[in-house]
Structures are given as C-alpha cells and as structure tokens.
Image (cartoon, rainbow, N blue to C red):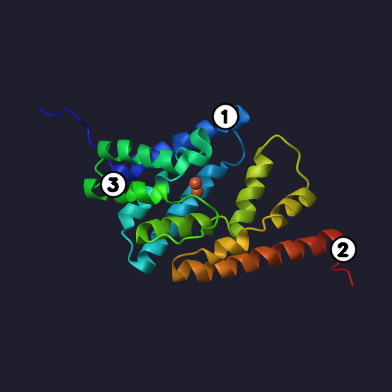
Amino acid sequence: MNDVTIIPWRNAARDHMHAATLAELHGRHGTEKVSFNYRWEHVTTVVTLALRLAELTGADAETVEAAAWLHDVCKFSDGEHHPQAGAAYARAFLPTTDFPPGKIDAVAAAIADHMGLWREEPLTVLESQVLWDADKLAKIGLTAVFHWTGGALAGERMHTLERLIHRAQANDWLPKTVASMHTAPARKAAEQRLAAYHALYEALNKELTGADLL
Ligand SMILES: [Fe+2]
Ligand SMILES: [Fe+2]
C-alpha cells in the first residue's frame, strides 16, 4: 500500500511561500512580528494579477498560479540567483503535491524567466510572459508606493517622507519596465500605473512644500 500523502498543491504552495516570507522577516529583522510583510503582500498581489492576465490572454491558469506562488520562494536565500533556485525548488516540491506533472516544466521555466526589471529580449512563452508582466506590474504604480512604504516603515531605520519620495523618484527604470511588458493588457495597465505613480508623488510634493498654497 502506498502511504505517501498527496497534498493539494495550491495550499501547499501558499504555505511554502508564506514560510519563506517569515524566514525573510526573521533574517532581516530578527523577528516575524513586524508591521508589514512586504514579500507576502508582493506575492499575493502577483498571484491575483497573474490569474487575471491568464484569463485575458488564454495562458494556462494553473501554470501561472503555481509559478506566481513560488516565483520568489528563494528570493531571500538566493538573492539574484533566486529565479533559477526557485525553478529548482518548484521541480522538487510540486511532485509532492497533486499538481499536474505535465505542467511542472512550464512552471519552472516561468520562474526561471522572471528575472530583471526590464528586458532587452522579450520572452516567447505565454505563461512566462504572464508571470513576468504580473510581477513587474506589482512594482509599478500605487501598489508599489504602498508596498515600498510599508516595507520601509516595517524596518528599524527611521524614514522621512522626503527620503521615501526621493527614493521613489530615483526609480528611473520604470519606463523601461513599462516598455518591456509582453501582453497588451499589462502594457496598458502599466502605462496607467506609471502615470498614477508620478501624479501621486507630484501631488505629495506639492502638499509637503506648500506649492499648492496659492
Ligand atoms: Fe523575483
Ligand atoms: Fe516578485
């Protein structure tokens, strides 16, 4: 009799990712009890966006969802090599679940492909394109503003609004990210998000400097 328990993949992937975010908090802050779990917020956002993009583009929903849950599972442990490490993690982990074995290669490929804030050469496989677009969409726009602000405030260093604004405005790669979007809905949303991001910082700057007092 086979006593190996096959676990439902979605819950298992979510649990593994959540555990990785707690390990990251421990590594960064020495405790899990911080006011904002940036990595968890980021990954859950990417899952939502990837599923929506799959719906709009016809990408395989299971493949992009599994890839989205696991794409940053090795981010803290492996830094810039985390796409390859995450792909290997998915290859080892998904077979212990009920995830369709025939889709594991595509999940691993999408995770391995998600590196970079912009791309010189576009990706060619739809599921990889969707994960890349969803991941980068989460780094543009008001989502990014609140994620970064939350992450910064969860740390121990003192931040001033001025410093947060300065840091956000130094992100000169954002137009390149928008131009690198693969799918039409992501490209359109990215343009709108970048405009909203600039508008927010412009308005905030006006408030803080009193430039709105006429
Ligand atoms: Fe990543
Ligand atoms: Fe990510």
Q: Which residue is mark 3?
A: 104
The three-letter amino acid code for the residue at tag 1 is: Gly
Q: Nearer the viewer, mark 3 or mark 1?
A: 3
Q: Position of residue 70 (x, y in %)?
A: 41, 44
Residue 193 vs residue 55: left or right? right
Residue 48's quadrant in the figure? bottom left
- Secondary element at tag 3: helix
Mark 1 is surrounded, within 10 Å at the Cα level, by few (under 14), some (14 to 19) or many (20 or more) other residues, namely few
Asked whether the viewer can see residue 32, the reply is: no
Q: CB of mark 2 within 8 Å of CB of mark 3? A: no
Q: For disc 1, does the CB lie below 8 Å from ligand 1?
A: no
Q: Which residue is mark 1?
A: 27
User: In the rendered structure, which disc, 3 or 1, sits on the residue that comes first in sequence?
Assistant: 1
Relative depth, front residue between 83 and 28: 83
**Residue that carries the numbered disc 2 in the rendered image:** 210
Amino acid bearing label 3? Ile
Residue 196 lies in quadrant? bottom right
Q: Residue at 48% across / 66% down in the picture?
A: 186
Residue 166 at least partly seen = yes
The N terminus lies in quadrant = top left
Report x, y in % for residue 192.
Answer: 58, 70
Amino acid type of the residue that numbered disc 2 sits on in the rendered structure? Gly
Q: Label 2, secondary structure: give it.
A: loop
Whether pointer 2 and pointer 1 mark residues with C-beta atoms closer than 8 Å, the reply is no
- Residue 146, x across and y down, in percent: 63, 53
Looking at the picture, tell me which residue is in the foreground, 99 or 37: 99
Q: Give the spatial CA distance, label 3 vs label 1.
A: 30 Å
Please, which residue is most extreme toward the left here? 1
Tag nearer the camera, 2 or 3:
3
136 relative to 59 in the view: left or right? right
x, y (%) of residue 131? 42, 55
